[in-house]
Image (cartoon, rainbow, N blue to C red):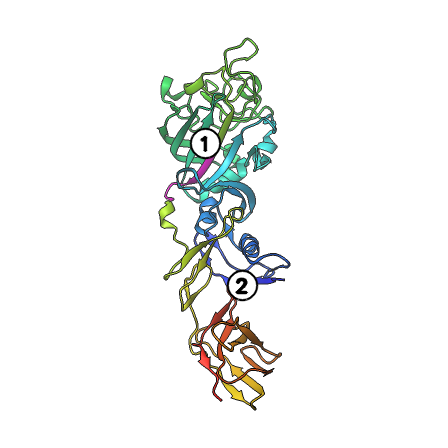
Amino acid sequence: MIVATVSYEDLFTKEEGRYFGSTSDNHITTYSNIDAEECARRCLQDILAPKDCTDVFALGIQYSHVYTIGYPQPFQAYCDMVTDGGGWTVIQRRQDGSVPFDKTWTEYEQGFGNPTVEYWLGLKNVHSLTTQKQNELYVYLEDWETNSRFARYSTFSVGNTSSKYTATISGYSGTATDSLDSSTDDGRHSINNRQFSTTDQDNDGISTDCAGQYGQGGWWYTPSCGYAMLNGQYLTGCSVPSASCSSADGIVWYTWRRYQYSLKKTIMMIRPDNFSASSFRPCQNGGTLKSGPVESGLYICTCAHGWYGAFCDQESPKDVTMNVITVNSTALHVTWTVGVSGNLTIIDSQVRYKQSDTEDWGVWASTGASIGSGDVYIYNLRPGAMYDVQVRLPVFPAIWQPYQPHTTLSA
């Protein structure tokens, strides 16, 4: 059984974008009966509070999955760690019609659906994400013939509740042709500076109730109702012109497929505009990445000698000492004292031993003496055996660190 016990206060300091500090109750997390890598994945999830998916990426968790993000109010979101280097927080996904998008104002504020399939992240959450950092927007579009396009906007943000979640958007590039910030007709199709509307709260500023008349979904409707309506009805039979497919009822991207074509799949995702995947090298000071199981998405750092910590960014303590006393030829009375430099606290200490290089290490564990020292009797260990001292520090994961070169017992 592997048990991991972690204290926020002891483990981490607060850094920009990654909150490692203590909670109000100095929360302790313990997991039992799980393997070490799964333990590491869960503990990272509990301890670290990433603001967005780039923070998750920076922690070395680089597998597309649902993660808990957001500060100070956490929420679950799907993180795309593949597209253009990863680090994207998905704010909307349509792919199979399993989640209706004809929701109320309150539901669009709070979010709805299943992050692993179809969902809307929630206007409050999107506002929080786009207020903390300047974000870009990436829109993926797919039709029923497996053709795909994308639209990218270098600037995207959503205002607060009092602004009715007004959208700010600019800087189009991509292959879909611009339907969100089109300058056609003096910008009357652009969602820039437009308020959000739903069927129960019409903020489009025109006599036409765009949400009620077109698709029933919440959106940033424009004076023309718009070129794009990605929260409309999910219509499976509107991939060709048909009398049964009313104009703009479905999932619409006008500048690619016009109004009567309802798309099969859409994904909207955001990330800070200064993100660079190559800048994230979590293992420092000569540490190397050891990839965890694919399903965990965790990358574990193997630290070089003299360094420890989740990112190998903390120098190991110095001045570790140990004293071994031979009692007689058949029994050894072993005592040791461990001392470290700096401000770290030792959780425990132990001594490893083996009779030869071909054997596995055995362990002398402390018998309850004060932390950092031990006193134990070990039988049947002959002169010539090798030993070293290890200490366990309050780091994540709380692994044993050897601090004395192997020494051979004298007769």
Residue 392: numbered disc: none
Image height of 213 relative to 160, above or below: above
| Amino acid under disc 1 | Ala
Q: Nearer the viewer, residue 113 or 364?
A: 364
**Residue 408 place in picture, x, y as percent:** 46, 82
Q: Quadrant of residue 180?
A: top left
Span colored in magenta: 269-275
Image height of 168 relative to 146, above or below: below
Q: Nearer the viewer, residue 354 or 79?
A: 354
Residue picked out by circle 2: 9
Taking the spot 54% from the left edge, 41% from the top edge, the residue there is 77
**Can residue 345 be seen in the rendering of this structure?**
no
Taking the spot 49% from the left edge, 71% from the top edge, the residue there is 358
Would you call the spot at circle 2 few (<14 residues within 10 Å), some (14-19), or many (20 or more)?
Answer: some
**Residue 233 place in picture, x, y as percent:** 57, 22
Q: Quadrant of residue 308?
A: bottom left
Would you call the spot at circle 1 few (<14 residues within 10 Å), some (14-19), or many (20 or more)?
Answer: many
Residue picked out by circle 1: 167
Taking the spot 50% from the left edge, 19% from the top edge, the residue there is 206
Query: Does 78 appear in magenta?
Result: no
Local SS, label 1: strand
**Residue 322 place in picture, x, y as percent:** 48, 82
